[in-house]
Image: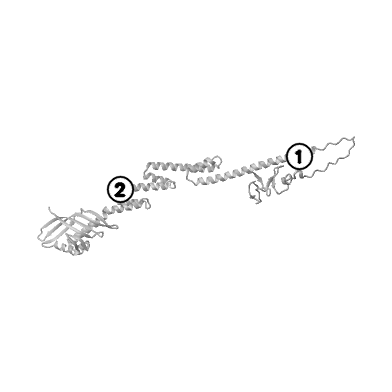
Amino acid sequence: MAIIKCPECGHSISDKAPVCPSCGVEIAGRIIRCKQCGGVYFKNQPECPYCHHLTAHNVSEPSQMTPPPPPVTAAVSSDTPAEEPAQTSTDDGQQHSNKRVVIISLIIAVVAVAIGYAFYAHAQSGKESEAYEYAMGSNDPNVLQSYLDTFGNGAPQEHVDSIQSHLDRLHQIDQDWTNAVVTGTKEAIEQYMRQHPDSPFKSVAVHKIDSIDWVTAQTTNTVEALEDYIEGHPSGEHVDDANDLIKGLNAKTVQPEEKVLVASAFNSFFTGINTKDETVVTSVVAQLLTSFLGKQNATRADVVTFMHKLYKGNVASQNWASLDNYKISKKEIGDNQYEYTTEFSAVQNVEMTDGTSTKNNYRINAKINPDGQITQLLMTRILE
């Protein structure tokens, strides 16, 4: 491939170009280079427009050429010497023409080299700009280093400085990340994220913190710890696992609010007996009890009857109270619905009408439904 001037408009183009990008004239296969002066012109022209040398296909074969006319010889006297042909002028013209061809050829060659270099320099400049934009948008140190290796010596200095600064920053980010990972603590990783909020390792750092908090919650294995994990990582990788563990713990671990539920039921039950208030007593008793003081399928009426029997004879008043030493277990009977089985001690102080008093201790076994109502009750007097 060579750089030529378009015979039509003079625009510098490749001799392999299909058409001239400036004037649109067809180029490839339609041009010829003059053997005499090196000029480029269209094949359909009969002669070179620069030196007027005939185009090759317009030169006749020797066998077809018209023989030149015989030379005309003038008669001369024997005393007059024959005149020599005038060759000097023709030779000078031929030499001048050859020099002009050489000069023109040299000029064309220089122009072609200059144009070629200009095209090459322009192409290299375009490649450098594209590589610079790509590297500045990348967080891969290998991409940045590749730019410096390829264009470092010829690129604009401001480009080189920007790429080097970007590369140094990425190296520092890498070093800080390595230090945080080696330390391995949540605090070190959180500090790294504060220093480098746009770090390429951000997603990995979030994952590591999530894992650290999950291990802590698992090790603690309490509802509170698991709920803290869910609150801190609402979209965490182990939220479902945490909820499953919470459900399992709730199924077998009595929470403080559940202890309050059980204690409140019996406090109300004893208050109703102490005041002989049927409404209060029956409010914390199920309509049908599986067992009450040994009677199966007892009703609230059976509970009221029991209360009145306690006041027969010469009983003036009595006071029942729990010793608040509840031992509670639970069983899931529905979705987040639990039945509570409890054992605790209670004391009965009885005031008689004659001014005397007695004190009795009881061991109580009972069951409470999810609504906080007594469904089963057994009282055993402890003899001292």
**What separation in Å lies between label 2 and label 1 (alpha carbons)?**
108 Å
Residue positioned 70% across, 40% down in the render: 103
Residue positioned 68% across, 42% down in the render: 108
Could you say which is closer to the camera, residue 27 or residue 260?
A: 27
Q: Position of residue 1 (x, y in %)?
A: 63, 44
Q: Residues within 10 Å of mark 2 (few under 14, many from 20)?
A: few
Q: Quadrant of residue 293?
A: bottom left
Sequence-wise first label, 2 or 1: 1
Q: Position of residue 74 (x, y in %)?
A: 87, 40
Q: Position of residue 212 (x, y in %)?
A: 35, 46
Which residue is identified by label 1?
Answer: 94
Residue positioned 28% across, 54% down in the render: 251
Could you say which is closer to the camera, residue 125 or residue 33?
A: 33
Q: Residues within 10 Å of mark 1 (few under 14, many from 20)?
A: few
Could you say which is closer to the camera, residue 51 or residue 318?
A: 51
209 in relation to 332, above or below? above
Q: Amino acid at mark 1?
A: Gln
Image disc number at residue 143: none
Which residue is identified by label 2?
Answer: 220
Q: Amino acid at mark 2?
A: Thr
Left of 182 or right of it: where is 124?
right
Left of 233 or right of it: where is 283?
left
Could you say which is closer to the camera, residue 136 or residue 211?
A: 211
Q: Nearer the viewer, mark 2 or mark 1?
A: 1
> Secondary structure under badge 1?
helix
Residue positioned 36% across, 47% down in the render: 211
